[in-house]
Amino acid sequence: MTDHLPSAAQVRAARALLAWSQEDLAKASGTSRRTLATLEGGGIVSSETMEAVRSALEAGGIVFTGNGGTEGLKRR
């Protein structure tokens, strides 16, 4: 697990890598599709939501990399 929360771009890329829809990620993270749309559009969501999204994506096989402007991800 990383020590930082993923960016909106990382969440979009992670979903694409897993071939997950926003609905798939909403179910996996226990949040709503509308909240994910807000997050992925660069809007503000709670840190609890971000942690739930990160955990769901990591459980799906995503590894977040980088910190401080050099963000990335890969599939485990």
Image (spheres, grey):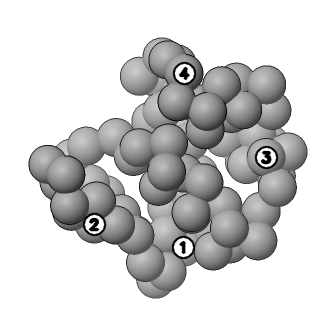
Q: What is the three-letter code of the residue carrying label 2?
A: Thr
Farthest residue, direction left: 68
Q: What is the three-letter code of the residue carrying label 1?
A: Gly
Classify mark 2: helix, strand or loop: strand
Classify mark 1: helix, strand or loop: loop
Which residue is labeled 4 in the image? 43
Real-space Cα separation, disc 2 to disc 3, in angstroms: 22 Å
Q: Give neighbour class at mark 2: few <14, some 14-19, many 20+ (Cα, 10 Å).
A: some
Mark in the foreground, 3 or 4: 4
Q: Decide: is 36 above or below 28.
A: above
Real-space Cα separation, disc 3 to disc 1, in angstroms: 16 Å
Which residue is labeled 3 in the image? 22
Q: Earlier in the sequence, mark 2 or mark 3?
A: 3
Q: Residue at x 76, y 71 (%)?
A: 19
Is 11 in front, or is 62?
A: 11
Which residue is labeled 1 in the image? 61
Q: Residue at x 66, y 61 (%)?
A: 15
Looking at the figure, which quarter contains the N terminus? bottom left
> In the visual, does 33 lie left or right of 31?
right
Q: Earlier in the sequence, mark 3 or mark 4?
A: 3
Which residue is labeled 2 in the image? 65
Residue 14 in sight from this viewpoint: yes
Is 44 in front, or is 2?
A: 44
Q: Earlier in the sequence, mark 3 or mark 1?
A: 3
Query: Would you say the residues marked 2 and 4 are in contact, meaning their CB atoms lie under 8 Å apart?
Result: no
Classify mark 4: helix, strand or loop: loop
- Residue 4: image x %, image y %? 25, 43
Real-space Cα separation, disc 3 to disc 4, in angstroms: 15 Å
Mark in the foreground, 2 or 4: 4
Query: Would you say the residues marked 1 and 4 are in contact, meaning their CB atoms lie under 8 Å apart?
Result: no
- Residue 7: image x %, image y %? 41, 43
